[in-house]
């Protein structure tokens, strides 16, 4: 019996840039409604790279915040793939791709596909998709998408209109991105938000979950990503001063008040970084550090 071809997946999303002041009426589509949008997405993708038509397109009638897609192991895409594995293939030609779209039943999406209520309301929403098939075809399609989608991946007018009408939103731009394109866009956004130092650690967690990375760049908090978690140093007061305010005097009430304000700002930055990491699905562990070194986080 011949060995079946290996399976490779292309991970991406239909990105919807919404008008910021317009309401969002629907987060998810019913199962009966999602098929039409999925067919349009499949046609668009095949228009970029014709071989994409021979791959299975798996998507969901829901839209998500970027942090819900950009998580170690790509859990939202993995959930789509695992749910699609149960779909029958009987009657489908071997060289033809299926369009598999998941929608809500009785207002509930299957599996772990429900968008998080913690991340609603942003102006940039994503409808994820997976393209799956033989290793050779998926590799070629994936390579072409990585080269071309960011430059010429605008969604068709019919697709943008269908998404707008289905979700009850005002779409200003609709385009396709791979998850790597999305990561590059988020890196720029984090740079503009003053979080550039954190991005290499996040990128390691996304692209090499088994790897490690240090954020060791004072005045930033000390963070070590290792063993699938981010360990944030919680310094004792003397250790904090030694690392972050070595030359600062503390022999007057005014100096001590200034140091206390600086320490509060540092703690707020720790909480901000922990919140960003948590939003990306990275476990955070605050570790007591009696000195200014890195040994406690190793």
Image (tube, rainbow, N blue to C red):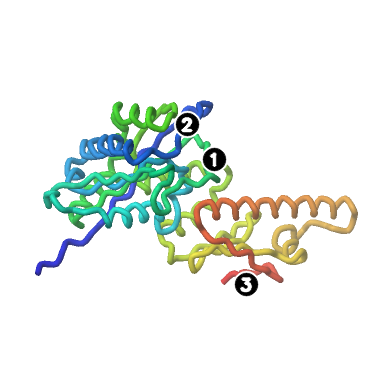
Task: Work out how far the residue at label 1 is from the one at label 3, CA to CA, in angstroms.
Answer: 31 Å
Q: Which residue is mark 3?
A: 296
Helix, strand or loop at disc 2? loop
**Residue at 55% over, 62% down:** 230
- Give the mark, 2 or 3, whose residue is nearer the N terminus: 2
Residue 43 in percent (x, y) is at 23, 36
Callout 2 crowding tier (Cα within 10 Å): few <14, some 14–19, many ≥20? few
Task: Work out how far the residue at label 2 is from the one at label 3, CA to CA, in angstroms.
Answer: 48 Å
Q: Nearer the viewer, mark 1 or mark 2?
A: 2
Q: Which residue is mark 2?
A: 25
Instruction: Name which quarter of the figure residue 31 lies in.
Output: top left
Residue 211 in percent (x, y) is at 44, 65
**Residue at 56% over, 51% down:** 276
Instruction: Name which quarter of the figure residue 47 lies in.
Output: top left
**Residue at 18% over, 55% down:** 136
As drawn, the residue found furthest toward the left would be 1
Q: Is residue 152 above or below residue 71?
A: above
Callout 3 crowding tier (Cα within 10 Å): few <14, some 14–19, many ≥20? some
Instruction: Name which quarter of the figure residue 246 lies in.
Output: bottom right
Label disc, if present, on residue 192 of the rendered structure? 1
């Amino acid at each position: 019996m011949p060995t079946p071809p290996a399976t490779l997946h292309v991970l991406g999303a239909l990105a919807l840039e919404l008008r910021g002041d317009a309401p969002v009426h629907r987060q998810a589509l019913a199962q009966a409604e999602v098929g039409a949008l999925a067919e349009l997405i499949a046609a668009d993708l095949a228009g970029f790279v014709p071989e994409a038509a021979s791959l299975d397109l798996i998507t969901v009638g829901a839209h998500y915040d970027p942090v819900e897609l950009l998580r170690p192991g790509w859990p939202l895409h993995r959930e789509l793939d695992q749910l699609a594995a149960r779909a029958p293939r009987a009657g489908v030609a071997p060289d033809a791709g299926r369009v598999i779209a998941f929608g809500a039943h009785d207002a509930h999406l299957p599996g772990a596909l429900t968008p998080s209520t913690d991340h609603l309301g942003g102006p940039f929403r994503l409808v994820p998709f997976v393209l799956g098939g033989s290793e050779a075809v998926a590799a070629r399609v994936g390579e072409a998408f990585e080269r071309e989608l960011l430059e010429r991946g605008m969604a068709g007018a019919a697709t943008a209109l269908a998404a707008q009408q289905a979700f009850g939103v005002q779409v200003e731009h609709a385009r396709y991105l791979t998850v790597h394109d999305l990561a590059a866009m988020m890196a720029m956004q984090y740079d503009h938000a003053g979080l550039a130092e954190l991005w290499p650690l996040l990128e390691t967690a996304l692209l090499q979950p088994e790897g490690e990375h240090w954020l060791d760049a004072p005045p930033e908090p000390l963070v070590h990503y290792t063993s699938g978690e981010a360990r944030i140093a919680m310094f004792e007061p003397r250790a904090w001063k030694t690392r972050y305010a070595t030359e600062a005097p503390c022999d007057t009430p005014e100096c001590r008040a200034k140091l206390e304000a600086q320490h509060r700002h540092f703690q707020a930055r720790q909480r901000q970084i922990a919140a960003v990491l948590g939003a990306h699905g990275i476990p955070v562990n605050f570790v007591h550090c009696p000195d200014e070194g890195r040994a406690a986080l190793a």
